[in-house]
Amino acid sequence: MMQQTADFGRPLLLSASQDLRGFLGLHLGRALLFVITCTSVLAVFCIFLFVGLEAVPFLAKFSLVEFFTGTGWYPEAEDPEFGALALIAGSVYVTLVAMLFAVPVGVLAAVFLSDIVSLRIRTIVKPAIEILAAIPSVAYGFFAVLVLAPWLQRKLGFATGTNALNASLVLSVMALPTIISVAEDSISAVGRDLREGSYSLGATRFETICRVVIPAAHSGIIAAIVLGMMRAIGETMVVWMASGNASQIPSPWWDLSQSVRTMTATIAGDMGETARGSDHYRALFALGLLLLVFIFLLNAGSEYFLARAKKALGKS
Amino acid sequence: MELTSRHISDKAFGLLAGFSAIVLVLVLGVILVPMILEGTGAVIFRGTVEFRAMQLNEFGHGDASKVQAEIAEVRPLRERLYDIIDTFKRGVDIDALQERAGQIHRQFGAELRYKDTPRERYTSLRSISRRIRDKLRAAFAGTDKEQMAQQIDSVLQYRGDARFEGTIATGYFELAAEFQESLQHIDLRRRRRYKEGLDEVEQIIRELFGPRPDGPPPALAMYRYGATRWDQAQKSLQRLLWTEKWVQLEQSRPLQKTLIERKKEFMGTQLEPLFGFVEENLAQMLRPKWTFYWRYFVDDSTPGHYFGGVGPEILGTIVLTVLSMVFVIPLGVISSAFLVEFASDNFVIRIIRMCINTLAGVPSIVFGLFGLAFFILFLIPAFGGPSKPCILAGAMTLAVLTLPVMIRASEEAIRTVPRAYKEGSLALGASRFWTFVAVTLPAALPGILTGVILSLSRVAGETAPILFTAGIAVGPLPKSVFDTTRTLSYGSWDMAVGDRLSAMVPHNQYGMVVTLVFLVLCLNGLAIVLRSRVFRKLKGQ
């Protein structure tokens, strides 16, 4: 029963001012949105800038060579030493050992989820991974200190339960969700056609996965590992609580029962005891800057591999 | 042959992969289950009468008259306990006995002076009193029972003396009589050993039943009450009944830790019945009752989180996360809207995306450094605020940290809105901006909400960024956003490594961290449910 009719009395043409307003509205609006979106860029810029600014006086005052090659970290001594090698080595050491545990388990679990298992088991394992990812790092650290450390000390007879092994184990668990989800994405992205081609040639599932699927998805898997490393190297609470915080390079190098100290833990642990503007304070910012550079490089690596994975799969 | 080996490798591979998935689930169980079991103990446990007294006095909870009645009911049994200890102590604690004798002597002198006793009488009484005191002291410190008995007897000869009638000096005779009685039970050679053992016993008794009701209340809240929990009480009871000793069981073997009944140490003394008495009557003296301590999530705590709950921590966590959401939601939603709806894939946008990815990878501790250098040292002072850690700085730091999470989640949410919605709106003549505001945004809202919840859970669990920007372990409730606050995450860290007191109350340690984990997991669960519902709805239409 609509009595109204559309009003066609007015021409559909806009006047010049209306036109201008519309144009300005659209473009100004877009510009505003763009500016707001640039907050992320600004944030990254500010992080580099402000962490860098606090670090520059230190880098100017002390030699970089000593910073990267010295192993003595005695910032509060009479004649302070800022040799970060042991800390860098600690970070890298713990991260690599964590990857040693996490990569096989993570990649296998990703293969398991994408290629082997039925949907029903998937619905059990998937939430488990999500929960693992959601648990706060301080809770992992809590577990490392109060549960894992006494257990290691009791069962394996270590001098101390808070050591490189403890930190690495917990870090590997924390890196697992990242590794699994990224690796699984790239493995599932390998098309059915490749798999079916392989099966039709008589290959078993093992052969298909190892010879066809994983090579095809290798860029994505590498990206997953790099992202896992990023998570592990930047992690603070767990390594601070579980690594024992002894600034030393383990010797012999394979001795996991020794305590180490990482860059993140040093920043977290020392910051409370420094005076603002002191050399020690600035040295911590220099460590932060170094961490940022590490992360930036790893991130660039992961982006490169992810882009490659995308391209490779786009072709096939 | 080849075929079988291939077959075997295939099966082995399948098993290995399955095993890795099982490891994953197992790890989750190993981490969560003990934590949750232990942490539940902070809320559900068997609380004793000491717990109810603590709740009443420290937090003002509970029915005062009922608690008082309960305390009165358990008192007679406890009095008997203290009697046993006191009787035993009389024969053992030489220093205390000598001190008491000296005290009587001094007070007696003061009394005489107060009464204005004539000088000669005063001098003679004082000298008798001194003689009695010295005899008693000698008797207390003696090593020969007969000699000691004689000394006591000679003191007791004065008992009938009219000059001492009704004065403080009668205390001498009570002391002497008491000692005479305990002298019969005591092995003099072991008095020193007894004294040490008794100190330990008294310590444990205090742990069980709190300080003596007649003494002054201790300054620290943790010493004001006995075992508030039945499990604690049982542990203390074990320590009371058994001692650990390193004993050489066989020759040329290392010493071994063995449990020895503490009763044996006090065999034949007046203290011996104490152990049986406590063991039998512990439940009557403490009255354990199953308690659901829901106020754990509301109550403040005493220093070291010895008693009480995590109320301020929960409050601080909520304030901090909500405030950071206030900053991050507009930024995140607008950014993602721009990226999805208005941006073409050019160089600038690629840089923006790269920055978002970098931001997501920045270590949380570096966010802490950034928050310190930027917000606390630069931005807040620039606006005239105080240059010190505060909630505002922490919330802004956390907002930057969670910005990538927010952007990614809302991007996904906006992307899942079906094209048909937008096209319908555009076809009706709405501008792209209005289409987004009136059509896309409402449809994407539940998805965006999922992102908000995920960001919330991430922010609630972060510790490193607030180490230097907002967090403290102990302190008053914040009054404004320019104060520091306690949070669950900071508290969990502090209780795990920083605080020696809290190591004595593991249930509270675990309670704190489980509260945090529970909060985070609930938020995540909510997000998962919401996401699946949204997904179904958008697919169904």
Image (tube, coloured by chain):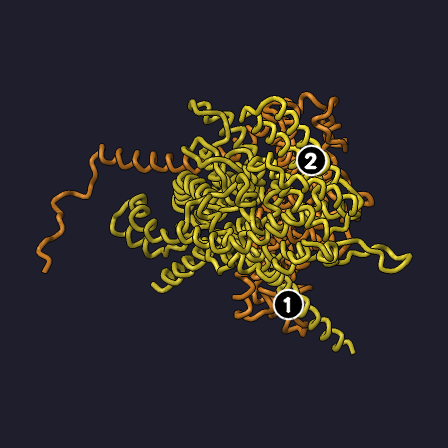
Chain colours: A orange, B yellow
How far separated are the C-alphas under marks 2 and 1? 87 Å
At 76% from the left and 74% from the top, the residue drawn is: B5
Q: Callout 1: 10 Å neighbours few (<14), some, many (20+)?
A: some
Classify residue B291 as left or right of residue A82: left
Q: Callout 2: 10 Å neighbours few (<14), some, many (20+)?
A: many
Looking at the rendered structure, the kind of residue marked 1 is: Gly
Percent x, y of residue B68: 44, 50
Pick whichever, B236 or B206, lies toward us. Answer: B206
Name of the residue lying farthest toward the right = B252
Q: Are marks 2 and 1 on the same chain?
A: yes
Q: Chain of mark 2?
A: B
> Judging from the image, what secondary structure is the residue with disc 1 in?
helix
Percent x, y of residue B179: 68, 46
Residue at numbered disc 1: B18
Asked whether residue B410 appears in the rendered view, the answer is no
Tag shown at residue B132:
2
Q: Can you tell which of label 2 and label 1 is closer to the viewer? A: 2
Pick whichever, A23 or B32, lies toward us. Answer: B32
Please tell me in which quadrant of the rendered image residue B161 appears.
Answer: top right
Q: Chain of mark 1?
A: B
Pick whichever, A17 or A248, lies toward us. Answer: A248
